[in-house]
Image (cartoon, rainbow, N blue to C red):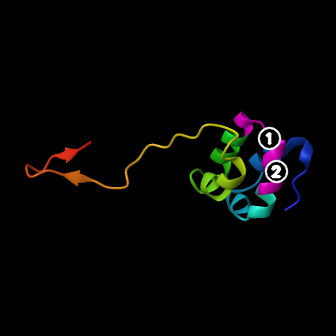
Amino acid sequence: MNIKEDNILEEIRNLSVSERRKLSYEELKEMLPKLSCDEIIEMSGLIGYPVFTRLCMGEIGHQFVLLQDGAAAIIVNAEGQVLL
């Protein structure tokens, strides 16, 4: 894909979902340094979070704070209660 540098987000918005999914890691990696923190967050919504952030975390890891809720395990006690 040929995304122009002057309006990256607008061009991403105009792509179909399938076109967005076809953006390569290399293309995304080239775009990231040209975007602000807010633009990166918006782009993740356009591309599809969490795939986008996991794909690009090496490039954006220190540009903004990323908090993700979730659990890697569910622990249940003897009474069948989920422990938090």
**Which residues, given as a range, are shown in magenta?**
29-39
- Position of 12 with respect to 73 (left or right) is right
Give percent across and percent down for residue 48. 61, 52
- Position of 58 with respect to 35 (left or right) is left
Give percent across and percent down for residue 73. 32, 55
Do the residues under discs 1 and 2 have CB atoms within 8 angstroms?
yes
Q: Classify residue 55 by image quadrant.
A: bottom right
Which residue in the protein does label 1 denote? 35
Which residue in the protein does label 2 denote? 31
Residue at x 9%, y 52% (from the top left corner): 78
Q: Where, quadrant-wise, is the C terminus in this rendering? A: top left
- Pick whichever, 57 or 14, lies toward us: 57
* Disc 2 element: helix
Residue that protrudes farthest toward the left in the picture: 79
Give percent across and percent down for residue 14. 78, 49
Secondary structure predominantly adopted by residues drawn in magenta: helix
Q: Classify residue 15 by image quadrant.
A: bottom right
Crowd class of label 1 (few under 14; some 14 to 19; many from 20; radius 10 Å): some
Q: Is residue 2 above or below residue 6?
A: below
Q: Say whether residue 19 is magenta.
A: no
Three-letter code for the amino acid on which mark 1 is drawn: Leu
Q: Is residue 76 visible?
A: yes
* Disc 1 element: loop
